[in-house]
Structure formats: C-alpha cells, structure tokens
Amino acid sequence: MTNHFNTFHLGDVSEIIAGGDKPKNFSLVRTSSKNVPVFANAEKDKGLQGYTDIPRITDPAVTMAARGSNVGFVAIRKEPYFPIVRLLSLIPHGELLDVDYLYYNLKQNRKTGTGSGQPQITIPDISSRTISLPPISLQKKLAKVLSVLDEKIELNNKINAELEAMAKLIYDYWFVQFDFPDANGSPYKSSGGKMVYNQELKREIPEGWLVKELSQLLRFERGISYKSKDIIGTGIPMINLNSFNLNGQYKHKGLKFYSGTYKEHKVVSAGDLVIAITDVTRNADIIGKAFTIPDLFDEDILISCDVAKVIPSELVNSQYLEPLFNSEHYHRYIKHFASGTLVLHLNLDGVNWCKIPVPPVNILNRYKELRTGIDKKLTLTLKENKQLVELRNWLLPMLMNGQVTISNS
C-alpha cells in the first residue's frame, strides 16, 4: 500500500447539503412513530433538538455548524437524521473518502467561518476547501486508531455517569426520602423511624436532626481576578466557569492555564468543594452548582473569579453539600438570587439564607465514606480519560498530515 496523499476539493469527494426548516412532524421526545433525530448547529447534546418521522439524510455523514459561536463544530452521524437550518451535512463519496476519516480531518482543521458579523460557513466555502487523502484503505486504518481511543473515552464517560447516578440515588435515598440506615441497618423512615414536623422547612424531618441556615454551616472564598493576557496555553491550572458541565460535575475540557502572579492562600486542592458564582444569562444552568475538585493535578490549582471555594463547618462535609447544591429544588431557589444583563452574578447572601436539614455527624460520616469510595473510582476513570485525550490529540494531527503511518499488518 502506498502512503501517498492526493489533494481534492471537498466538493469533489462529498455531497454537501444545507439544513432546512424544522420538520412539521416534530416531537421533543422520541416516540415509536417519531424516532428520527433532528439536529441543529449546537454543540450541547451534539445538536439534538428532538425527533421526527422521516429522515432527510440516510447515508453516514459529518455535520458542521455553519454559523454562530460554535461555527465549525463537527459531529459524525451514522444513523438516518434530519438536519435543520445552519447545519451543513457532508456525505462522502465512499470510494474516495471514509466518513470517519473526514470527521477527524475536519475536527483537526476546524474551519472558523468568515463575515464581519456572525462568522458563517457557506456551501461554496466548504466545497472549495482542500483535503489531502491517502488511499481509502489507509484512511479507514488511520481513522480506526482514533475511533478506538474515542470509544474507550466514551465508555469511561458512561461508567462515570453510572457512578454519578449511583451517588445521587444514595443521597436521595438517605437525605430526601430519609431512608438512611438506622441503628439496625434498616431504612429509617420506611421502618417506622420517628419523623417530626419542622415549622421552618414546612415538612417532616427525622427526629434529632437540626435545621440551619447555610451561613451557619459554611463560608466562601472567592477565586482570583485575572486579565486575558494571563490566560495562555501553559501555566497554573485554573478551574473556571467552563470547568462545570450542566450537571455541575467537573469538565476537564474547560480548564484554563494562568501565567500571572497569585497569593498562596488562593491555592485550592483536590477534595475541595467549589461553586459557580456567575453564568451567562441565556443559559443560567451552571450558576450555584458545585463539584469536588478531582485528584488529577500534580501542582497548584487556582480558581477564577467566577468560582468560589466552599469551606464547610464541623457540622457538615463537602460530600453532603455537593449534591445539595446540584439538586433541582436548590437550583430553582438560587436562581432568584442571580442578577445581571449579559452575565449573571450570584448573590451569596441568597445561598447563606437557605435553610436545610442537618443530619447527625455519624450519619454524615457514613455517607462521606460511601461517597469517597465512589469519588476514587470516578477519579481513576477521569485520569485514564485525560491520558487518552492527550494521546488522541497528539496522534490526530500527525495521522492527518501523514507524519505517522500505519503498516499493512
């Protein structure tokens, strides 16, 4: 097999189709009759908007966001789907171009768009773009190397999602349904454990539990203010608003690196609980949510001014507070204390005024032990994914540019 690369225009090796209007038969949820995914040009959920009954694209394709802040974002689609406005579909000619190879090539060479206003990519833009292609058999082998890594990363993400769901289930079981193990190991409330009505919370809680304002249980330390010139590709890892996913969990992809000066007391550590105190107004999905910093770093860690460290008192622990901050009930409450035109800022007084039930220390310590075991497994998987992403990102440009080749064996 030759490793020679030939250059083509994308319009000569693929069919390019622009997305249209939303289909008339549309559902936000999948049903038996509407099970064809409808995709737009968003990155969230890879652009999934809902479902329809008849696909517009039936062949494997790569989609590209053609306008907006996420212009150039690509996703691979191997099942029939329906693209809508501002989403381009590239359907490769199978004898010349492999769909997986096309995906990784476009991912490596992300197109940024043109225009004085919102950047955009047109069909003529992408059609005239050149792509260097080895023989189709080699394309498949090169793409397979990368897809194996991505499949393992995705599997690890699913494992961690299951672990997170398990942790949430235990928290809900113990501290929402009040079925924590009693002295005999039986579920407290279901086994007849005494409940008492609390006037402040307007509901029953287990006998012996306290009710406290969060101001009595914790304090906050804000992160550092910074200038854009201090954010470069190297430096001290800095957790920021982009480090939070929509569920409040840590997202390594959003990490920034800070090259400026900082004071030692601003350093945070693995195991510290941090909370998002700003958000963009169009989403408001992150503000008030929290995660425990995973043990992924061999150096100092900082948090940005959009984030605050939560320091619990001796009455509670981070393991109890984290799922509280990420609960739907609390998130609905905290949004009333966020204000701003373009950027929301959280009034921490609103957090401090929130009243919560406080279990006895022995119950909190038992939950902490359970949650710590889950967190250790989560961290191991996160570490593996970090290494896999680094390996994939190192290989991607060299495979696409022919600097690294795959043998016939």
Image (cartoon, rainbow, N blue to C red):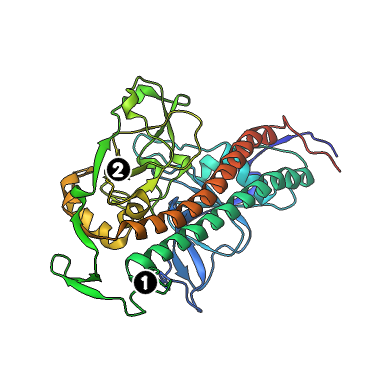
Q: Quadrant of the C terminus?
A: top right
> Residue drawn at (59%, 49%), measured in percent from left and top?
153
Q: Position of residue 63 (x, y in %)?
A: 54, 51
Residue 333, placed above or below residue 183? above
Residue 95, placed above or below residue 389? below
Q: Position of residue 379 (x, y in %)?
A: 52, 46
Who is closer to the viewer here, 354 or 75? 354
Within 10 Å of disc 1 (Cα), the crowding (few <14, some 14-19, many 20+) is many
Residue 20 seen in this snapshot = no
> Residue drawn at (70%, 49%), measured in percent from left and top?
98
Q: Position of residue 301 (x, y in %)?
A: 41, 31
Dot 2: element: strand
Q: Label 1 amino acid? A: Asp
Q: Position of residue 16 (x, y in %)?
A: 57, 51
Dot 1: element: loop
Which quadrant would residue 29 be assigned to in this image?
bottom left
Judge from the rendering whether residue 313 lies leftward or rightward of residue 38; answer left or right: left
Name the residue beneath numbered marker 2. Answer: 310
Residue 310, placed above or below residue 213? above
Q: Are marks 1 and 2 in contact (CB under 8 Å)?
A: no
Within 10 Å of disc 2 (Cα), the crowding (few <14, some 14-19, many 20+) is many
Mark 1 or 2, nearer chain start: 1
Residue 179, numbered label = 1
> Residue drawn at (25%, 40%), measured in percent from left and top?
220
Q: Label 2 amino acid? A: Val
Who is closer to the viewer here, 300 or 174? 174
Q: Quadrant of the N terminus?
A: top right
- Alpha carbons under labels 1 and 2: distance apart: 27 Å
